[in-house]
C-alpha cells in the first residue's frame, strides 16, 4: 500500500513537471481533436496489426523453438539461421524488403497484409527464443516420467512440457507484445495508416507537429502501460507461486 | 521367499553403457522372473540407476540387449511407447507433474494413451492410502505422499513390472516407512520388481534376490541371506560393513 502511494506520488510529480514544461509552448490540442476520428482509425489499425502479428509470431515462434530444440543438427541449424537473420537486421530494413521484394514477388499489394506478416515474421525470432527458454526450463525428469508412462513425444510436449513452460513464458511474452506495439509504428513507412501515420499526416496538414505527436505518444502509453503493469503483477505472483506452491 | 520356476520376464544380456570414457555398465547379465523382487545395492555411481533406465529405454545400451517378456527393448523401435508403458518407473525425485493434481498425475497416461476414465486412477490412489488427496497439487504433499502418488501413477498403465530408482533416498527418515509399506504390499501381490535401494532392511525382508553392484558390474548376486550373511567378495563385505554399521 505504501509502495503504491510512493509510485503514485512520483508519477504525479513527473506528470506535473511535464505539464509545466509543455506550458511554455503555445499548445492547442483542439487541432488534433478535430482529427479524432482519424486517430481512432489509426489506433484500430495499430491494435489489429500488432495483435495479428503476435498471433503469427506465436505460431511461427513455436515452430522456430521446435526447430532449435531438434536432435538433428541440420534442423537445429535451420532454426538458428532464422533467428540470426531476423535478429541481425533492423526491422525497418525488413519492412522495406517485405514491401518491395516479397510483396512484388507474390503480387500482393495489401499493405496491411504485408506489414502484419513482416511484423509477425520479425516477432517469431524473438518469441521463438522465449519458447525455447521456457521449454528448456522444464526439468528433464518431467520428460522422463512422461515417456516412462508411454506418452509419445508429442503428447509429452502438449500435456507435460507446454503447460509448465507456458506459465513461465507469460511475462516475457507480454514484454514482446509491448515491443511489437511500438515496432508496428514503422509500418507507416510502407503507407499503412496506423497511429504513427495519422500523427505525421495531422502534423503535416496543420503544421501542429508537436501536438500531433504528443497525442500519439499518449495513445501508445495507454496501450503499453497496462500491459506492462499486467506483466509485472504476473511476475510477482509467479515468484510467489514458485515459492509457496500457490497456483495461478 | 521362494518362487515357482518361470521364464524370465526381464533379461539383460551383456548390457554395456558408456558415457565418453566412463563405463557406467559393463557386460551386465541379469534375469528377473515373473513375480520376483530383485534389489540392487551398491555405492553411488555403481550403475544401479543406469541399469534400470536401460530396461525402460530411457538409456540405450552401447552393447548387449534388454528383453522384456521376450521383446527387445530399443529406444529406436516404433512401438517403444507401448513397451515403456508395460514397465512402471518410480524416480528418486518423484518427477510428479506439478501442474496436475494427484489424480491428474495418475489419470494422465491412461487417459491419453488408452482413453480410459478416472475410476481406476481413484482406486489406485486409494490403494496407496491417498484417496483424500486426489484433488491436491503435488507441492502441497509431503515427500512420502508424493512418492506414493508416483507409485500409483506408475501402476496406472497396468505394468507387468515395476522399476524403483532409489525411491526413498530423497525422503525425510520419518516418511521412508510409508513408501516401503506400499512397495511391500506390491511385492506381496506378486508384482515383478527391480529396486535400486539403500534400504537394507527392505532388501532383507522383501527381496527374493539381492545383487551387489560396483563399478558398473554385478559383483555378486544371491538370496538376501547369501549376500548379507555370507558375502563372497571383499568389495561386497567392505560395502556391507559400511552400510550395516550405519
Image (spheres, rainbow, N blue to C red):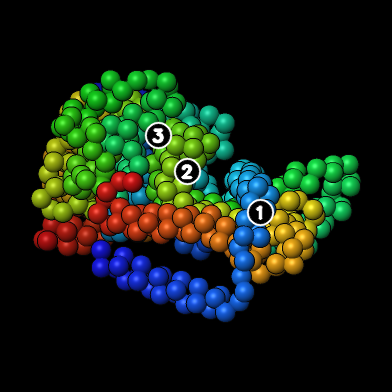
Residue A209 picture location, percent across and down: 70, 67
The residue at 30%/67% (across/down) is A5
Mark 1 → mark 3, Cα distance in angstroms? 65 Å
Q: What residue did someone put label 2 on?
A: A162
Q: Nearer the viewer, mark 1 or mark 3?
A: 1
Q: What residue did someone put label 1 on?
A: A34
Q: Is residue A25 visible?
A: yes
The residue at 62%/60% (across/down) is A30
Earlier-in-chain disc, 3 versus 2: 3
Q: Is residue A65 above or below residue B4?
A: below
Q: Nearer the viewer, mark 3 or mark 2?
A: 2
- Label 2's element? helix
> Do the residues at discs 3 and 2 belong to one chain?
yes
Residue A11 picture location, percent across and down: 41, 70
Mark 2 → mark 1, Cα distance in angstroms? 48 Å
Dividing the picture into quadrants, the one containing residue B4 is: top left
> Do the residues at discs 1 and 3 belong to one chain?
yes
Amino acid at each position: 500500500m505504501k509502495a503504491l502511494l510512493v509510485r503514485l506520488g512520483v508519477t504525479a510529480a513527473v506528470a506535473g513537471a511535464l505539464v509545466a514544461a509543455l506550458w511554455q509552448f503555445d499548445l492547442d490540442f483542439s487541432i488534433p481533436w478535430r482529427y479524432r476520428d482519424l486517430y481512432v482509425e489509426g489506433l484500430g489499425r495499430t491494435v489489429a496489426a500488432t495483435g495479428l502479428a503476435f498471433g503469427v509470431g506465436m505460431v511461427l515462434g513455436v515452430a522456430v523453438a521446435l526447430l532449435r530444440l531438434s536432435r538433428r543438427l541440420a534442423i537445429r541449424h535451420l532454426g538458428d539461421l532464422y533467428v540470426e537473420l531476423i535478429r541481425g537486421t533492423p526491422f525497418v530494413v525488413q519492412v522495406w524488403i517485405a514491401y518491395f521484394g516479397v510483396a512484388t514477388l507474390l503480387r500482393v499489394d495489401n499493405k496491411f497484409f504485408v506489414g502484419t506478416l513482416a511484423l509477425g515474421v520479425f516477432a517469431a525470432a524473438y518469441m521463438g527464443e522465449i519458447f525455447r527458454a521456457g521449454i528448456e526450463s522444464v526439468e528433464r525428469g518431467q520428460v522422463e516420467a512422461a515417456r516412462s508412462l508411454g506418452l509419445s513425444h508429442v503428447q509429452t510436449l502438449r500435456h507435460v512440457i507446454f503447460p509448465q513452460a507456458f506459465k513461465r513464458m507469460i511475462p516475457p511474452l507480454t514484454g514482446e507484445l509491448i515491443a511489437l506495439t511500438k515496432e508496428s509504428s514503422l509500418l507507416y513507412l510502407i503507407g499503412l495508416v496506423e497511429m504513427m501515420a495519422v500523427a505525421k499526416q495531422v502534423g503535416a496538414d496543420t503544421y501542429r507537429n508537436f501536438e500531433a505527436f504528443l497525442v500519439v505518444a499518449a495513445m501508445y502509453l495507454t496501450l503499453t502501460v497496462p500491459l506492462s503493469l499486467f506483466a509485472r503483477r504476473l511476475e510477482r505472483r509467479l515468484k510467489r507461486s514458485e515459492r509457496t506452491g500457490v497456483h495461478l | 521367499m521362494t518362487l515357482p520356476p518361470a521364464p524370465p520376464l526381464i533379461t539383460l544380456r551383456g548390457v554395456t553403457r558408456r558415457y565418453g570414457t566412463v563405463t557406467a555398465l559393463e557386460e551386465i547379465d541379469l534375469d528377473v522372473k515373473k513375480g520376483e523382487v530383485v534389489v540392487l545395492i551398491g555405492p553411488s555411481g555403481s550403475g544401479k540407476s543406469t541399469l534400470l533406465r536401460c530396461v525402460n529405454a530411457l538409456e540405450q545400451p552401447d552393447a548387449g540387449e534388454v528383453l522384456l517378456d521376450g521383446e527387445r527393448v530399443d529406444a529406436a523401435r516404433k512401438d517403444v511407447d507401448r513397451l515403456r508403458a508395460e514397465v512402471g518407473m518410480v524416480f528418486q525425485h518423484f518427477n510428479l507433474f506439478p501442474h496436475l493434481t494427484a489424480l491428474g498425475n495418475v489419470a494422465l497416461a491412461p487417459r491419453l494413451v488408452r482413453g480410459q476414465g478416472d475410476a481406476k486412477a481413484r482406486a489406485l490412489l486409494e490403494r496407496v492410502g491417498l484417496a483424500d488427496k486426489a484433488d491436491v497439487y503435488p507441492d502441497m504433499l509431503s515427500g512420502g505422499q508424493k512418492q506414493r502418488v508416483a507409485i500409483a501413477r506408475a501402476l496406472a498403465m497396468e505394468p507387468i513390472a515395476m522399476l524403483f530408482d532409489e525411491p526413498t533416498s530423497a525422503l525425510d527418515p520419518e516418511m521412508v516407512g510409508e513408501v516401503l509399506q506400499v512397495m511391500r504390499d506390491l511385492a506381496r501381490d506378486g508384482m515383478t520388481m527391480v529396486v535400486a535401494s539403500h534400504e537394507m532392511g527392505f532388501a532383507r525382508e522383501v527381496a527374493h534376490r539381492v545383487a551387489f553392484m560396483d563399478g558398473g558390474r554385478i559383483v555378486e548376486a544371491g538370496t538376501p541371506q547369501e549376500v548379507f550373511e555370507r558375502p563372497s567378495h571383499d568389495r561386497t563385505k567392505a560395502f556391507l560393513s559400511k552400510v550395516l554399521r550405519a
